[in-house]
Image (tube, rainbow, N blue to C red):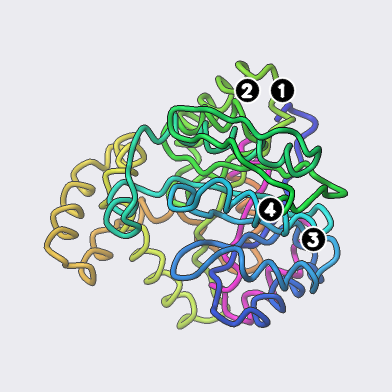
Amino acid sequence: MAKGKWRMHIDVSFFPSGDLRADAKLVASAEQVGFCAAWSAETARNPFLPLTIAASASESILLGTQIAVAFPRSPMVTAQIAWDLARQSQGRFVLGLGTQVRAHIERRFSETWTDPIGRMREYIESLRAIWDTFQHDARLRYRGKHYQFRLMSPFFNPGPNARPDIPIFLAGVNPGMCRLAGEICAGLHAHVFHTATYLRDAVLPAVEAGLAVSGRARDEFALTVPVFVVSGTNDEARRRAEAETRSRIAFYASTPGYRRVMALHGWDEIADELSVMARAGQWNAMAALIPDELLREVAIVAAPDEVLPQIKQRYAGLADRICLEWNGFDRSTRSVVAKGLHQA
């Protein structure tokens, strides 16, 4: 985003709890505190369901997925869900999509893994073709290598929305997907396992290359950055947050998909050792391999009243939106961070 126009938005993300009313209450409280958006993650539960109630329990906060896994869902299924959420939220819904990794697509979802960048391009083109049919009753004719849509009878068309333009954000770590986001999406969800150097040297150049193809300026695109935070109002809370963060960093660092981040900082030997331990199932021992230097490059390690100032210092000029895992903070830390929100 152009210098002088940059403003950081502070968002929250949450893992759906299985209690839709509790999740809606969390979103409503985030809106009341002053957060700009609430993002629902797809892990053990469906990311769309909590937003159905949250849309009615809130008035102004943006609602989105960070992310929904695309390939196991037909674009038609995703298009219908997003259309309904856009209507329910009166235009506040943002569709965040991601590919996941090959092992999960093939072995957890029993789906085919083919050309993820090309397939994602067609997935997004398909969504827009379907939405155009919903809105204008246009004839549905999308033909691609991976997806073809040629049938939409009136009985299955939900009809127009008052606010039909649904922003699409794409999750990306490697340059190819980041470039695609810059080319055809409204924003990019960076991965929580990143460093400021990786964003600056790998992610943003790829995004800007995609923006150049689409003829758009940087300030027409939003880079959303989720952030690990190690904090707490007492020693026990800080130790718990640090242990959880080291464990999650170790998991990501052991995965080939995030090897570029490790390589950029010369942490290849750590990554190799973590990969060996992961294959051996030594999950509980992996966190001990994460040195303080790595922890502090990837996470914000700070007292609660310094979390937002340190975020602003690290990400100024890099990120347009910062995303905090709100249900990962203890109640006392939430209170302190919330007080400083309007000064961030």
Q: Position of residue 314 (x, y in %)?
A: 58, 45
Q: Which residue is mark 1?
A: 217
What amino acid is at disc 3? Answer: Ser
Q: Which residue is mark 3?
A: 89
On the question of residue 297 being in view, the answer is no
Q: What residue span does the magenta drawing correspond to?
A: 315-344
For marks 4 and 2, give the CA distance: 35 Å
Q: Earlier in the sequence, mark 4 or mark 2?
A: 4
Can residue 335 be found in the magenta stretch? Answer: yes
Q: Residue at x 27, y 44 (%)?
A: 256
For marks 2 and 3, give the CA distance: 29 Å
Q: Secondary structure at mark 3?
A: loop
Category of crowding for the residue at label 1, using alpha-carbon neighbours closer than 10 angstroms: few (below 14), some (14–19), many (at least 20): few
Q: Residue at x 45, y 36 (%)?
A: 198
Q: Secondary structure at mark 4?
A: helix
What amino acid is at disc 4? Answer: Phe
For marks 4 and 3, give the CA distance: 21 Å
- Pick the residue in front: 173 or 241: 173
Rendering quarter of residue 315: top right
Q: Is disc 2 in contact with disc 1, using a CB cutoff of under 8 Å?
A: yes
Can residue 119 be found in the magenta stretch? Answer: no
From the viewer's perspective, is the residue at label 4 or at label 3 nearer?
4
From the viewer's perspective, is the residue at label 1 or at label 3 nearer?
3
Q: Which residue is mark 4?
A: 156
Q: Position of residue 323 (x, y in %)?
A: 61, 56
What amino acid is at disc 1? Answer: Ala
* Numbered tag placed on residue 211 in the rendering: 2
Q: Secondary structure at mark 1?
A: loop
Q: If the image is split into quadrants, where does the N terminus sit? A: top right
From the viewer's perspective, is the residue at label 2 or at label 3 nearer?
3
Left or right of 25 in this view: 105: left
Q: Position of residue 44 (x, y in %)?
A: 44, 70
